[in-house]
Image (spheres, rainbow, N blue to C red):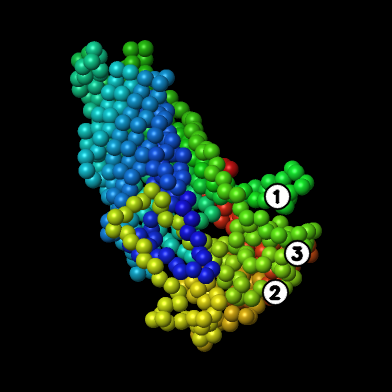
Amino acid sequence: MKKITLSALVCLILLTSIPPSVSANEGYCGYEGGISSGEVAGKTSYEYQEVNFLTGKPVVLKGTLMIKKSLKGEKISSTYTYDLKNTDTSSTLKRTLIYSTKITKKDNGQIVEETSLTGKPVETMKIGNESYTLGSIEFSRTNLTDVKSAVNYYAGNFSGRKIYKTGDSTGGTSSTTGSLTVDITGKFYGYDQYWGTTEVEEIKYVIQSEKKKDDKLQKWGGTADVTLSTSTTKQMEYIKNKPNEISFEGGYIEKQLNSSILEYSAKLPAFDVNGSPTDNIITTNDSLKIETFPVQTRLKVPNLSHLKGHWSENDIKILYSLEVMYGNDTLFNPEQFMNRTEFAKAVLQAAREVPSDSSLSSKTAKAKTTTSKNKDEMQTFVDVSKDHLWYNQIETAYKRGLLNGKGENRFKPDDYLTISEVLTVFVRALGLEKMAPTNGATTSFKDNDQIPTYARNAVSVSEQIGLIVGDDKGYLKPNDKLSNARAATLLNRFIVYMRDGIRKDYREKYFGF
C-alpha cells in the first residue's frame, strides 16, 4: 500500500483532483467472484483464482488479473483483463471487462459510487470440447463510503446477468448448440486505512442451461454461493542480532501481508455417463486461498537503553521505530506528562491518512504544493500562532477531526490530557461512537462513576474493542493525566486494533477465524 506520511516540518502535498473515495483495497479481486494476491505498490498484474460453474461442475481456474485504472473528473475507468486456465480439465478463460464508476460526494461527507459496464465486454471459456462465449451482459453496482478520520468504511450491492452461447468444438470447428444464463447478486463490506484493509463479499449465482444434443433439448439448473475476503495488513516483528559486537542489539521489521480466502457451496445436477443431466443434485463445498510473499521494510532503531526493564519499554520502542513518537530518544522520560501538542504530533502518525489506490493513474491530477503557514490562511486557534513550531501538526489534527479545541477558539497546546480525553479521540478517529449502548453506556471498571459524561460512550466502546483494560485492581483512573508511558501503551494498542482487531470482526462473521 502506498504510504501517505505527514511530515513534521515540511509542506503538505495535496492531490486536489483525486477524490477521497479512491481506496487502496476495493476492487483488487475484480467483480467476478474470485480472489487475487492483493495490492503491492507499483504492480498492476496479480495472481488470481476463481471457481467457474458454467459446465455444471465446479472448475477452479488460476492465472493472472491485470487492472488498469484512470481518473478523469469525477469518473474512474477500470479495465480488468483475466487470463486463466486449469490444465487438469483442459480449460482456458479469457475475459476483458471495462467499468465506469461515477463518484458523488454527499453534503455529510459520505461518498456514493455507481459502477456500470462500458465498452465491449469479451469473455470466452473452453473446457475440453465445450465452448462458452459471452453473448450479452448486464451489470450494476453501487456502494457508499463513510469517511472517518483514520478509517474509510464502505458497503455496497451489485447484480448482473450473463448470457452465454454454448457450443461443441471438434475438428477445429465450433457450432452453437445452446445457451446458458447466469444471474448474479451480491453484497460487500469493507474498510480501508493505513495499517490494514479488509473486504468481504457474499455472492449468489443462479445458473440455467439449455442445450441441444442429438436433437434432444437438455435443461438443467443449479445454484452456487461464494463468500470471499481479501485483506492487507502491516505486521511488526522484532529481530535480535546474533553478534555481540554490534552497535545495536536488534530492530523491528514491518511486513506487509496480503491474504485472500474463498469458500463456496454449489448445488448442481449429477450427469450420467453420456454427459446428460439427471434429477439428482450434488452439493459441493470447497475453498481457495492465496497468501503473498511478504514485503519487508526495516525500521529505524532508537536509542532507548535507559528504559531497559521499564513496563512500557516495548511500546515506546515500537512507536519510536514507527516514528509515531520522535525527537531525542535518549531524553525520553516515560513518567513525564504528555501535553496536547505532543499528543497531536503522535496521533497524526498513529492515525495516518487512508492511502490512495496505487493502481490509479490520472492525466488530469496535478500535485499542488501548499504550506500550512500560508500568509493568507486564517489560523484556527488564537493561542497557536503561525510561528508556533508545531502549528502545522495542530492545524492538521484539528482539521482531520482528531483533536478539538478547548473553547473560545483556544487549543491550549501546553495543557495535559486525561485518559478519558485520549479514548474519546481514538473512538472518534475510528468512527465507532455508535457502538455504545443507546440507554446509557457503562463499563466494568470499579471507578466507572468517575468517567466524565462526555467520555462515557467512548470509554465503553474502548473497553468493548480492547483499547483499554483496567489495572490489576480493576480501576481505570479515567481522570489521571496522561504520562508518556501510558500514552505509548494506548497509542500502540490503537495501532494494533487497526492492524488486527477490526479485521477479526469482519472475517470471523464469515470464516470462523
Say which residue appears at 72% left-offset and 68% top-offset: 331
Q: Amino acid at mark 2?
A: Phe
In terms of sequence position, does the residue under pointer 2 or pointer 3 come before the other? Answer: 2
Say which residue appears at 62% left-offset and 64% top-offset: 325
Q: Which residue is mark 2?
A: 337
Quadrant placement of the C terminus: top right
Say which residue appears at 33% left-offset and 61% top-offset: 366
In terms of sequence position, does the residue under pointer 1 or pointer 3 come before the other? Answer: 1
Q: Is residue 20 above or below residue 238?
A: below
Q: Amino acid at mark 3?
A: Asp
Mark 1 or 2: the one toward you: 1
Residue nearest the viewer, comparing 41 with 287: 41
Q: Is residue 288 above or below residue 427?
A: above
Residues at discs 2 and 3 in contact (Cβ within 8 Å): no
Q: Which image quadrant for residue 497?
A: bottom right
Q: Residues within 10 Å of mark 2 (few under 14, many from 20)?
A: some
Instruction: Compute the Cα span from label 1 to label 2.
Output: 29 Å
Instruction: Compute the Cα span from label 2 to label 3.
Output: 19 Å
Residue 283 can be seen in this image: yes
Residues at discs 1 and 2 in contact (Cβ within 8 Å): no
Query: Residue 333's spot in the image, x, y percent?
Result: 73, 69
Q: Is residue 230 above or below residue 406?
A: above
Q: Which residue is mark 1?
A: 250
Q: Amino acid at mark 1?
A: Gly
Instruction: Compute the Cα span from label 1 to label 3.
Output: 31 Å
Query: Residue 102's spot in the image, x, y percent?
Result: 29, 56
In terms of sequence position, does the residue under pointer 1 or pointer 2 come before the other? Answer: 1
Residue nearest the viewer, comparing 378 with 155: 378
Q: Secondary structure at mark 3?
A: loop
